[in-house]
Image (cartoon, rainbow, N blue to C red):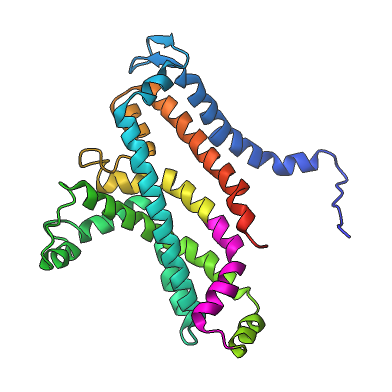
Amino acid sequence: MLKRVHFRSPVLPYLLVAPQIVITLIFFIWPAAQALYFSVQRQDAFGLSVVFVGLENFADLLDDPLYLNAFEVTVVFSLATAALSMGLSLLLAVMADGALRARTGYQSLLIWPYAIAPAVAGILWLFMFNPTVGILAYVIRSFGVDWNYLLRGDQAMMLVIVAAAWKQISYNFLFFLAGLQSIPRSLIEAAAIDGAGPAKRFWTIVFPLLSPTTFFLLVVNVVYAFFDTFGIIHAVTRGGPARATETLVYKVFSDGFIGLDLGGSAAQSVILMVIVVGLTVVQFRYVERRVQY
């Protein structure tokens, strides 16, 4: 039977949740309301001339080929980052879970990158792939590949995908490892006794039981790729070359803080918010049906 908590004072429950409500209002509700307000206006860089334009900013964005290019770049970048980070995290979690010796050491080393700021992670990969002094760039050129991400958009995209996925691997690893350790060993041992090999045991027993964790990480990684990778892109490529790595969130920054198009930038942020909310709803409505709790 579920026990309910009763407070003697009717004010105490509201006082306990008040800090979270204040934080939500200041850092989420208020900025979102401001974005909606500015998205229907057109103003100069100093805010001295403000004109109400309704949905004109949104119509201009949908007709802008540069914005459509940013949308395509975001789709490719997000899918590749989520797939790469989750795939490698699951592989590392399986290897760490099966290690008998130094398991704690493996776990500690693999979660360190999560403590690094996105901009710092981008700078680390930038140094390693720098066309002039990067050690990994030297290795790539030794195989006959003309590596220069400053001039080639496909190479720049690959670099930011690798950097963004590496930054997120530690977070995914922790959840996958916790999910693996919660699976009863008796199920796996019973399948092994019945003659199921390691691959069959993983795909028929382990992976289905990890579906709640995988679904949660899918939602988190999509949101991460849309928003939290701004620091990596800004530090490594700044959206170049030729806008090959300009994602939607970076275009919001570029048009708003560099181009000083405050109304268009606010409209972009509203569209980005709607896209992420829509993707989350789709994931919970359709993808969650395949999750086995």
Q: Give the residues drawn in magenta, as a range.
A: 195-217
Residue 144 seen anywhere in this rendered image of the structure:
yes
Magenta includes 207? yes
Magenta includes 111? no
Is 159 displayed left or right of 106 in the figure? Answer: left
Q: Residue at x 78, y 43 (%)?
A: 13
Residue 292 location, quadrant = bottom right
Q: Residue at x 47, y 87 (%)?
A: 101
Residue 266 image position (x, y, % from top left)? 43, 26
Residue 117 seen anywhere in this rendered image of the structure:
no
Is 189 displayed left or right of 63 in the figure? Answer: right
Residue 33 image position (x, y, % from top left)? 54, 26
Q: In the rendered image of this protein, does residue 234 appear above or below residue 146? A: above
Residue 28 location, quadrant = top right
Is 105 displayed left or right of 132 in the figure? Answer: right
Q: Residue at x 28, y 43 (%)?
A: 245
Q: Residue at x 56, y 69 (%)?
A: 207
Residue 287 image position (x, y, % from top left)? 58, 52
Magenta stretch secondary structure, dominant: helix
Q: Name the residue furthest bottom.
A: 193
In front of the other: 193 or 77: 193
